Amino acid sequence: MCEEIVKALLPSPQGVYVDATLGGGGHTAALLEAGAEKVIALDMDGEALAYAGLRMARFAERLSLHHSNFRYLDEVLDQKGIESVQGVIFDLGLSWHQVRSQQRGFSYQGDGALDMRFDAESDSPTALEIIRGEPKEKIERILREYGEEPKARRIAQAIVEHRREVRTTRDLADLLRQVVGTSGFRKTAMRVFQALRIAVNDELENLRLGLDAALSRLASGGRVAALAYHSLEDRIVKDKYRRAEQNQEYRRVNRKPIFASEKEVKVNPAARSARLRVLEKL
Ligand SMILES: C[S@@+](CC[C@H](N)C(=O)[O-])C[C@H]1O[C@@H](n2cnc3c(N)ncnc32)[C@H](O)[C@@H]1O
């Protein structure tokens, strides 16, 4: 949804923009190409920064890369001596590169370590540590709240019973197949892997804090664009925007979310679940 995002953020030669989720750098490059004066780009994933640094060497003077969680956006901007920005983009979730890297453990297809940390250099607990170390009730809550998994109790019970045998993504996938059978397996695996990933990275709290920081740093006329891929994220974005509008310093640019075009969905099926919401500071 690069085109929609560039349109929403109206990049200008006088504007500093934040790409809170650099990933492969598609949005950063599009903002710079469309004329943004400067982009401050953040990612928790050191690999994303290294790759983008190489790929976007031509923009080096207008691009500032930061290995940081966007919940610390205030600190990053303070460090740079930047008070306000013209736009912030959040493209939530994980990048293609992360999904495809089996050893990062994000995908139930293939086999890799049950890691799932966006920041593989951090010392925060991995998915395996959650599976091995947390009580059944907490695992059930993670699956129910972050995966909206209807069979959370049964799956949590099975995980706790077999956790010493689970080491890799394939072990976990096999266990899920045993619990729910082949027909329900794909959807369950997607929900369980999403739930663990959200828990490992504290994604929902990051989003709340990142949006607060972004809103507080917008210049007048500046915009935040948030691209959510599941209802938990989208609900947080929607509520933040609604509350922000109530204090009359912001307005929602679009009441209803913007969806990817059919053309884009054909090329990239994951875009089907993307919802873009845009807020403007008055
Ligand atoms: C969907 S991808 C972004 C793709 C990017 N827009 C592009 O054009 O390639 C999301 C990225 O955000 C990063 N990320 C997720 N949560 C983050 C957080 N709290 N702080 C910083 N980066 C985060 C992930 O590591 C991943 O690289």
Image: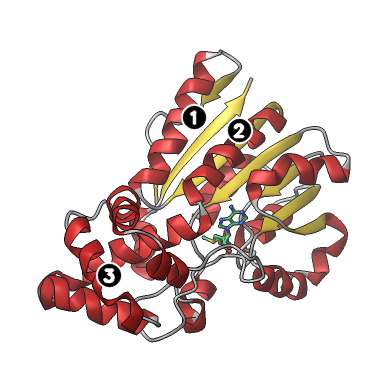
Residue situated in front as seen by the camera: 124 or 20: 124
Badge 1 element: helix
Residue at point 36%, 50% (across, down): 230
Mark 3 belongs to which amino acid? Answer: Ile
Residue at point 27%, 70% (across, down): 159
Image coordinates of residue 85 in percent, x first then y, are 75, 36
Residue at point 50%, 83% (across, down): 103
Q: Earlier in the sequence, mark 1 or mark 2?
A: 2
Which residue, given by chain and number where applicable, does mark 1 sit on?
A: 240
Image coordinates of residue 158 in percent, x first then y, are 21, 70
**Residue 140 can be seen in this image:** yes
Which residue, given by chain and number where applicable, does mark 2 sit on?
A: 212
Q: Earlier in the sequence, mark 2 or mark 3?
A: 3
Question: Rounded to the nearest whole Å, what is the CA distance between mark 1 and mark 2?
Answer: 8 Å
Which residue, given by chain and number where applicable, does mark 3 sit on?
A: 159
Residue situated in front as seen by the camera: 13 or 282: 282
Where residue 162 sits, quadrant-wise, is bottom left
